[in-house]
Image: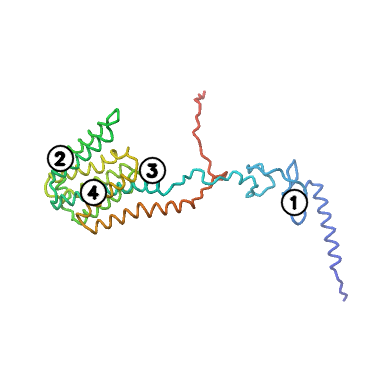
Amino acid sequence: MFLFNCSPLMSCMTDVTKSTYLSSGKNNGIVKSSQYSTKVKYQNGTICNGHPRGHLKLKPWKKNLYSNEGYPDNYTDKSFLEELRKNLHVRKLTLLEAILGAGLITQRLCIVVIFALSFYALNCNLISPLLLLISTTSFSFIIYLLLYENCKTIPLWLMKSACAFVVSGYILSPVLKTLTETISTDTIYATTTVMMCVHLVFFDYGVSAVIVSTSLSLNAALFGSICLCSRLQTAFHVFVFITIAVQCFAVSPILLSPIKSSITILLSFVTVTFVLCVRVSSLMSGLFILTVLFINLMCPYYFVKWHSFKDNIYGPWDEAIVQDIKIKDFHVD
């Protein structure tokens, strides 16, 4: 037997086959690139791939997928990032502005605490119901006159609505006194606490957000007030308590809306509430001060500190916004 080395012969046959295949491909209008590029048809103006060793140059890349033949689908040019914009609508806040913004939450918290202290005073007979009614009503009326004395049109609808609430409360006070008597006191207090938290969370602090709901905030506060009515002694106590609830949750947001937040107003609310808390409990006053410091100092400080790391990007990759299209009237025969 003879052994032959067939490798030269096979190499020669492979070269001949490859040259024949390439020559036939050129005749059919197909361009074969080198080993560093891929096969691309060149027929009727179609352009080859974009590799530097390709046979033809590509058209300039455009931000239209259908006009970028020869480019991969995920390819982007340097011009793609020229439209990149960062933090277009971000407003930088100072520490004072953040504190004043948090002061609106503190004002509402102070009103809730004063309302709770009013219930405690009525329930424990620490003050006469008539004296408490006169003092709170006079305070609301004085604020009403101070805020709207320079206005050409005095919003009498506010007084009419408040009177309607008061008259309804006076008529329904005997019913409210016995409405939740069968429910345990612990359940009443827990329900009222939850409702007041809902009132604080969904209250309108002047910031447009999805979570804001004025009706839910008001209804939750009034529901919590009605739950507490059954723990008072007489129907007149219930009437006074409902009147205070209307002033705190229905009238005060309207009265305080023209007032811009300031350090003076914030300190006034905190001081009055703190003095009332001290007369009731030292523990309650300490918790109140800690809560106020957390809301008005710690939260604004970290908000301003972390706000500097905010990085919103805008560019051609954002979702398209569909505008309203007006279609002219047309008739179909």
Q: Kindly state the secondary structure of the residue where label 4 is placed.
A: helix
Q: Mark 4 or mark 1: name the one nearer the start of the chain.
A: 1
**In the image, which is nearer the foreground, mark 1 or mark 2?**
2
Q: Label 2: few (<14), some or many (≥20) within 10 Å? A: some
Considering only vertical position in the picture, is 63 above or below 284?
Answer: above
Q: Nearer the viewer, residue 72 or 21?
A: 72
Q: Mark 1 or mark 3: name the one nearer the start of the chain.
A: 1
* Residue 63 image point, x, y percent: 63, 42
Q: Nearer the viewer, residue 9 or 297?
A: 297
**In the image, which is nearer the foreground, mark 4 or mark 1?**
4
Q: Mark 4 or mark 2: name the one nearer the start of the chain.
A: 4
* Residue 326 image point, x, y percent: 50, 29
Amino acid found under the numbered disc labelled 2: Tyr
- Where on the picture, by quarter, is residue 163? top left
Residue at position x 85%, y 68% in the image: 6
Q: Kindly state the secondary structure of the residue where label 2 is placed.
A: helix
User: Dot 4 corresponds to which residue?
Assistant: 114
User: Dot 2 corresponds to which residue?
Assistant: 170
Q: Mark 1 or mark 2: name the one nearer the start of the chain.
A: 1
Q: Mark 4 or mark 3: name the one nearer the start of the chain.
A: 4
Do callouts 1 and 3 mark residues in contact (Cβ within 8 Å)? no
* Residue 64 image point, x, y percent: 63, 42
**In the image, which is nearer the foreground, mark 3 or mark 2?**
3
* Residue 22 image point, x, y percent: 81, 53
Do callouts 4 and 2 mark residues in contact (Cβ within 8 Å)? no
Amino acid found under the numbered disc labelled 1: Pro
User: Dot 3 corresponds to which residue?
Assistant: 207
Marks 1/3: CA–CA distance: 56 Å
- Where on the picture, by quarter, is residue 153? top left
